[in-house]
Image: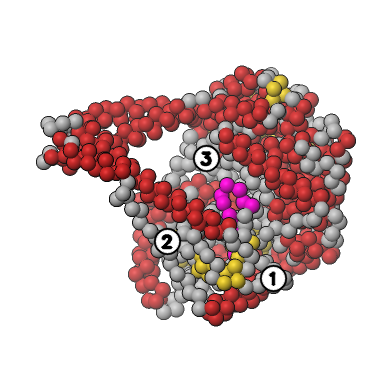
Amino acid sequence: MASPFPQFSALYPFGLDEFQVQGCAALDEGHGVLVAAPTGAGKTVVGEYAVFLALSQGRKCFYTTPIKALSNQKFADLVKRHGAANVGLLTGDNSINGDAPVVVMTTEVLRNMLYAGSTALDGLGFVVMDEVHYLADRFRGAVWEEVIIHLPESVQLVSLSATVSNAEEFGEWLETVRGATKIIVSEHRPVPLWQHVLAGGKIFDLYNGADPETPDAARVNPELVRYCRQEERLGPSGRRGRSAGVGRGGRSGPPSRVDVVDRLDSEGLLPAITFIFSRAGCEGAVQQFLRSNVRLLTQEDRLKVRAHVSARTADIPREDLNVLGYHDFLDALERGVAAHHAGMLPTFKEIVEELFVQGLVKAVFATETLALGINMPARSVVLESLVKWNGEAHVDVTPGEYTQLTGRAGRRGIDIEGHAVVLYRPGLDPRALAGLASTRTYPLRSSFKPSYNMAVNLVGQVGTARARALLESSFAQFQADRAVVGLTRQLKRNNEALAGYKESMSCHLGDFEEYAALRRALSDREAELSRQNSASRRASAAAAVEQLKPGDVITVPTGRRAGLALVLDPGLDTGKEGPRPVVLTAERQVVRLSMLDFPVPVEPQFWMRIPKSFNPKSPQSRRDLASALRTKAGDEGVKPTRPRRQRADAADDAEIIRLRAAIRRHPCHGCDDRENHARWAERYWRLQRETEQLERRVRGRTNSIARTFDRVCSVLTVLGYLDGERVTEPGRRLARIYSELDLVAAECLREGVWDGLSAAELACAASLLVYEARNSDDAAPPRVPKGPAREAIERTMRIWLETHNLEGDYDLDFQREPDTGFAWAAYRWASGHRLEAVLDEVGLPAGDFVRWCKQLIDLLGQIADAAAADEGSGVRAAAREAVDLIRRGVVAYSSVT
């Protein structure tokens, strides 16, 4: 049968690259294929050929993506090409033509189909896994491996990945679990990417050469190096008003965003995406444009923008538009600029994407989430900084992240070349930047681990033994087994070195190994006493903190929050971590402290009343109370003091006295070469310890996934979800819950925690299992409704603590602590309150509110399915009603995502 490839390739206005042709040929031959290529290189062409083949052969093709926004975009693209009748969409909150021969879906939807044995899998010939490198994601990555392992053997798998340095290793694993798989790696960008630094009003080339295809850290532009050295030598004080940026950039700070875009415009480098690693920064950039006179669009284009935005927002009530900042949003778009981040309403983000692709938005200020697969290429990409906040600390951008971000630059078929521009900041090292831009070592690492839901589904379908075998075929175990080979070689080298060290530490006066053991025992005993002393201080400190009451004023002894603080909430119900009081510092910050902030006991200095009107979210309220705190501290004569650390006294310890005497009596103690022998003995001991750790790592990595699965099954057996090889009735309910807190949700169902709750109360209680605060320091105590909902929340927290403790008995830690931060918002929204009131009360951006509502809808749907056999509890009906109550207003008209 002749290949349909000629008809397919004719659909594209450009000739296909060699790697695309090879990928399509592999599919024609009946093989699976892994395509690893740079962002923007066109690897989706191979996935689209799988769709074309399926339709031409009368078979089905599922096209999976990691995020709903990408699913929507791909759905629209495929509908345009193949017609609405042939293409469907299935995401967590959307179902359009799900029986079509081609269905676009999120990866989780396909995983759920496989476990449910869905009839939709009948006739499935191809599965495309776009952005398959997501399997490294520590929260969701396991889903990709589950799908790859469990897909029927007859299905041809198309895996599309960003460039990773171990594509061959990943391809070898695919071949072991999926059969014949063609591995195609392309480093070539169809649109060359030039690297630049914008500094001192000038755009410098990063590399000194004419070939952007071969970036080399050794070819750094000497003119740029000289400029950076001069700036560092002068320093801020030496510049005397000279800007390190552009135009009004300040003495040594970066240029204004308006000036940067203006400069790019003058160089013909728009449209551009500027990556700013904060939502507030993105919104601040747009506000800078609104305050300026810069307009990047013609009057004709402005009219097009207004018409498009009006049409896309026609269904949104006017009062909601006011809450969502619509008028500033539209004003910025008419100037040709926009923000793009997860805190925006999904509809607004889609409008930005649509107008950008049409060339009607010239400058987008985005967080890095835009780089995760959305097809939104630009002529230029700007990076404001090479450091970002990862939720826990400020960290350097990795080579993989740099490549992913700058990969957006250069539009195939439009631009001859793309441009990546890094803004100069004091301390920028051009050679380090060149190394970052030229590094190609970012391997794909599996994040796979068994979950409770996975375990009951596998045992129910194939039994424990077959389930263990399936899990041992995971990429995680494949990588672990490969690592064992290297570890074994290292063990051999270590043992050879130990023999040499042992010979070098031998002493003619006696057994030096025995003498060294005495010295080591003495050192260990002294360290143990020091630890005991520290533990005693920590226990005393915890006991003191537990006595604190609201209104107590204390001096925080150490840490970033050291100094005077007013206790707002003692924070006693925080589990194993000990008390975590919420305080207001003298610097007006409301923070939750931990026991790390209290190395020594703390006592109240005095007490002061906390006004009933105090609102921890109000800057004015915090400022007033902090001022009162400082004033009263002055009146009381309280001054912050530093803790005095006590040294551990080991002089009276009987074991230390015995060891010191034994050391002095040992024959080797009198050796003239004793300290030289001791140095060899220390090396021997350190290498011995390293060798023992290596041996433990080898044992730990051998069958590691299967042993974790065994522990998961043990927990499920103790709780009654498994009975040997049989999945019990509660286990069958658990099999329908795919939440991160799957076990807690199943326990809540079994214990009747949600029985009898109204729809709004159930939405409130279930929100604990989906919501996770972005910032753990956001310490204002969450508001929860009174009555049955509060009781359900308290019971949920007790269930989590019980399951968490049980997990600890089996060396597991899968169930994070439920978060009450969205409970009030879920309750108020499901109770019918207006958007403005809900957002004002909880302080959430509209985009975050919509996203959490959609995740809650998803979980409530799973709860309704799981509770199907227990109609008497009312949970199923309440869950379905809650879905309808939440899916209204902004949530409903954002269901396009």
Colouring chosen for the image of the structure: secondary structure
**Residue 568 vertical position relative to residue 756 in the rendered view, above or below:** below
Residue 457 placement: quadrant: top right
The kind of residue tagged 2 is Leu
> Which residue is located at x 46 percent, y 59 percent?
600
Q: Which residue is mark 1?
A: 614
Q: Where is residue 892? Give x, y as percent.
A: 82, 51
Mark 1: few, some, or many residues within 10 Å (few <14, many ≥20)? Answer: few
Magenta part of the chain: 573-584
Q: Is residue 233 visible?
A: yes
Question: Which tag, 3 or 1, sits closer to the chain's start?
Answer: 3
Q: Which residue is mark 3?
A: 163
Q: Nearest the camera: 526 or 803?
A: 526
**Residue 389 vertical position relative to residue 564 in the rendered view, above or below:** above
Question: Which tag, 2 or 1, sits closer to the chain's start?
Answer: 2
Is residue 57 inside the magenta stretch?
Answer: no
